Structures are given as structure tokens and as C-alpha cells.
């Protein structure tokens, strides 16, 4: 049975090796050469959440001297926020969803892979959600963490992000920069264990694991769990426990990140049960088969 599962994932990789990840429109007017960190935010809808997140990210960037680029990559039927990004000097790229998605669904995994393949290479990639707010000392703390990190970094405390209420989210969106940590006493704390949302990874590790698996995941999907699993397999003390957070990443207890409220959409994707099944299959494959799949994906991903 494991061979059937392995062959299924292998065929997905091979059949989609020519997946279109090229930007059809981009405005990169504010790019630092030889960046320490490239921040990638994928976008489709939720404009208020996006520009609130960017407001806090830019405030945090001002607190550090390390070279950082911020990119917004929109995947949709048309470039809805190109002009507002241009006016605000935000590096912007557009992926036509008709050309880059099988199911006319936003693909976070494909957005991130498009960045890795097309944007100036940094030392580190920060793959960041549209709706996550960072504190103003975010990059000052990461600057110190990077100096001692030998793997990759989860840049938020308690292995989870904090969920803001609807009222607090509206207040934050309609105000100037606030001390975001003032909201911590009344946030919702979800279950511990989310491996994604915001992940800081060296470029070389991204290439070694073959990036994200945009061949397998569309819409709301468990792409972060598999990306994290691949990192665990190659660069950590991976064992046969089918879970993340085995101690291989560097965790940031000093940082809280805050998820802006919106109507839950995790169960709106009709493909989610199918993709969760793929995730479960990947997790339960023997270690040797996981390594073979990772190496295959690496080979395909690194082809020009």
C-alpha cells in the first residue's frame, strides 16, 4: 500500500513539473540588492488585512538596519491591487490564476515557489500570511536569532499565533500604529502546533527541499505541514513520529504574532478533504520513501 501512495505523489510531481510560475506583471521598484530577508506575502482578497499587516511590517523594518525586501504577490483573475502597491512603493507581482491554477483556486504554495524562482535571492525567506501582524521589535529580535540559528526559524511564541477579536481587529485596522502586544491579554489562543503562517527559512534549505508542493495543494491547504516535514526529514533529528515540532527549528519565545479576525474559511475549500488525505499519506510513508520524494522534488524544482 505504501508503494501505491508513493507512486501517487511521485506522479503528481512529474506531471506538474512544468507548472507555470512566471509573473505576468511586476513592479519591483524598491528592491535592495543582496538582501538579508525577502518577505513574501501571497494575496487574494482581504485588502484591509493585507495593508494593516504591511503597516506593521514596515514599522518593524524601520527598527533594524538589516537589508529587507517586502513583496506582495497577487494571484487572481486580474491585478486588483497593483496600482495601490505602486503608489505606496510596495514591490508587487501578479500571477494570472487562469494560467497558474488547475482549479481556479488561489495557491499559497505556488505563490511562494514563484517568489523563490523569480525574485532576487536573499539569505532568508520569510513566508508570511496576509493577515498576520508583527510587533515593532520583530526584525530586531530576528536579527539576533539569525546569528545563532543553524536550521530555520518559527518567528512566534508558543508554536501558535494569537487570534484577535473582531472588535480589536477593526480598531487596529482603523488606527495608526498601536502597541500590538497590548491586545495579548484578551486574544484567543488556539491549539499549540501550527507549523506555518510565518516561517523564516534560509534560501539554501528552500532549494534542498524543492520548495513548497504546489503540485499537491490548492486553496486553503496543509502545504506548511509538508514543507515543515521535509525540512525535518533533511535537516533535523527526524524520527518516525508523524508530527511537526521535533525540536529542529529555532523558536522565538520573545515574539507574539497576531491573526486579524475574519470569517473562518478553512472549511470552504471542496478539495480540503482530498488534500488532508495527501498530507496524512505523506506523513505515514516510510522515511526512505519520504527522502526519495524530497530528492525528486528538489531535482524538478531546481531545473531551469
Image (cartoon, helix red, strand yellow):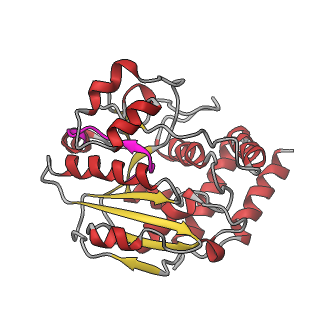
Question: Residue 225 magenta-drawn?
Answer: no
Q: Which residues are magenta?
A: 126-138
Q: Position of residue 174 (x, y in %)?
A: 32, 44
Q: In this rendering, does residue 6 appear at all? A: yes
Q: Is residue 116 left or right of residue 209?
A: left
Where 241 falls versus 227 (above or below)? above
Q: Is residue 130 magenta?
A: yes
Quadrant location of residue 87? bottom left
Q: Indicate whether 148 appears above or below 165.
A: below
Q: Nearer the viewer, residue 39 or 11?
A: 39
290 left or right, relative to 202: right
Specify whether 74 is left or right of 279.
left
**Residue 285 as seen in the image, left or right of residue 25:** right
Image vertical order of residue 260 relative to residue 128, above or below:
above
Identify the residue at horizontal 65%, vertical 32% (top origin).
242
Instruction: Name the spot of residue 234 as percent of width and height, x first.
Output: 51, 47
**How far across and how far down the image is residue 15, in percent?**
74, 71
Name the residue rendered at 80%, 50% in the picture: 5
For this rendering, which residue is in front, 289 or 47?
47
Please state, as top left, top right, bottom left or bottom right, where the N terminus lies in the image.
top right
The answer to which of 251 and 231 lies nearer the viewer is 251
At 35% across and 68% down in the image, what residue appears? 84
Amino acid at each position: 500500500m505504501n508503494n501505491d501512495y508513493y507512486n501517487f505523489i511521485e506522479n503528481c510531481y512529474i506531471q506538474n513539473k512544468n507548472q507555470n510560475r512566471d509573473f505576468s506583471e511586476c513592479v519591483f521598484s524598491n528592491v535592495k540588492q543582496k538582501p538579508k530577508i525577502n518577505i513574501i506575502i501571497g494575496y487574494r482578497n482581504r485588502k484591509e488585512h493585507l495593508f494593516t499587516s504591511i503597516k506593521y511590517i514596515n514599522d518593524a523594518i524601520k527598527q533594524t538596519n538589516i537589508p529587507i525586501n517586502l513583496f506582495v504577490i497577487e494571484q487572481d483573475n486580474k491585478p486588483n491591487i497593483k496600482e495601490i502597491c505602486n503608489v505606496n512603493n510596495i514591490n508587487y507581482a501578479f500571477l494570472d490564476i487562469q494560467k497558474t491554477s488547475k482549479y481556479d483556486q488561489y495557491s499559497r504554495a505556488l505563490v511562494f515557489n514563484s517568489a523563490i524562482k523569480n525574485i532576487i535571492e536573499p539569505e532568508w525567506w520569510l513566508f508570511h500570511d496576509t493577515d498576520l501582524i508583527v510587533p515593532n521589535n520583530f526584525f530586531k529580535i530576528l536579527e539576533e536569532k539569525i546569528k545563532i540559528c543553524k536550521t530555520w526559524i518559527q518567528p512566534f511564541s508558543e508554536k501558535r499565533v494569537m487570534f484577535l477579536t473582531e472588535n480589536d481587529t477593526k480598531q487596529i485596522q482603523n488606527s495608526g500604529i498601536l502597541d500590538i502586544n497590548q491586545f495579548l491579554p484578551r486574544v484567543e489562543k488556539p491549539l499549540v502546533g501550527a507549523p506555518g503562517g510565518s516561517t523564516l527559512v534560509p534560501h539554501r534549505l528552500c532549494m534542498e527541499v524543492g520548495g513548497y508542493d504546489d503540485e499537491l495543494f490548492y486553496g486553503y491547504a496543509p502545504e506548511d505541514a509538508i514543507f515543515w516535514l521535509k525540512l525535518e526529514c533533511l535537516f533535523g533529528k527526524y524520527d518516525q513520529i508523524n508530527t511537526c515540532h521535533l525540536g529542529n527549528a529555532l523558536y522565538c519565545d520573545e515574539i507574539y504574532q497576531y491573526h486579524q479576525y475574519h470569517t473562518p474559511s478553512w472549511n470552504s475549500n471542496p478539495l480540503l478533504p482530498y488534500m488532508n488525505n495527501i498530507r496524512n499519506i505523506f506523513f505515514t510513508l516510510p522515511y526512505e520513501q519520504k527522502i526519495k520524494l524530497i530528492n525528486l522534488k528538489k531535482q524538478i524544482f531546481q531545473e531551469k
